[in-house]
Amino acid sequence: MKKQAVPRIRIDPENSNLKQILTNCNGFAKPGEMLAIMGASGSGKTSLLNILGERLDVSAGCKINKEIRANNIPVLKGDFGKLGAFVMQDDILIETMTPYESFCFAARLRTNLPEQRVQAKAQDMINRL
């Protein structure tokens, strides 16, 4: 029986205080489907999503070397929102709002769309769910 290699955390040779937490990550999600990223605490789930979505409040000294591709095409800075979305783990939803009102509220904060388009997009999202 052949012995399998055990994956190891690689340390940055230039800075021994840095450790590599993600390497060669890839995945597949079908259009129109929800994707769950699951793993133990500290396994890099939030780091992966923050890097993909360019929502980076990274620690001082953190180094990110990335190439993001979708359908084998490089995803340029600012393009993730055209491909997908995620809710940050500390995102706040107002409990007295309906889902429609929450979608409208979030769209007003994150886009510069006219109000009529905001409402149409929120209704479309409700219809798709």
Image (tube, rainbow, N blue to C red):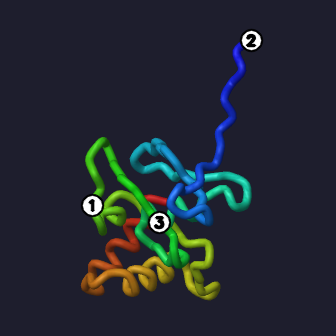
Which residue sits furthest top?
1
Q: Mark 1 Cα within 10 Å, few/some/many (few <14, many 20+)?
A: few
Secondary structure under the numbered disc 1 in the rendered image: loop
Identity of the residue drawn at 39% across and 47% down: 31
Rendered position, 16 above or below 30: below
Q: Are marks 1 and 3 in contact (CB under 8 Å)?
A: no
| Quarter residue 125 falls in | bottom left
Q: Position of residue 92 (x, y in %)?
A: 59, 83
Q: How many marks?
A: 3
Q: Position of residue 12 (x, y in %)?
A: 54, 57
- Residue type highlighted by circle 1: Leu
Disc 1: which residue:
76
Identity of the residue drawn at 26% across and 46% down: 73
Disc 2: which residue:
1
Q: Mark 3 Cα within 10 Å, few/some/many (few <14, many 20+)?
A: few
- Residue type highlighted by circle 3: Lys
Instruction: Name which of mark 3 and mark 2 comes first in the sequence.
Output: 2
Identity of the residue drawn at 38% across and 81% down: 110
Viewer-closest of 114 and 8: 8
Q: Please state, as top left, top right, bottom left or bottom right, where the N terminus lies in the image.
A: top right
Secondary structure under the numbered disc 2 in the rendered image: loop
Secondary structure under the numbered disc 3 in the rendered image: loop
| Quarter residue 94 falls in | bottom right
- Residue 127 appears in the picture as rendered: no
Viewer-closest of 33 and 123: 33
Disc 3: which residue:
63
- Residue type highlighted by circle 2: Met
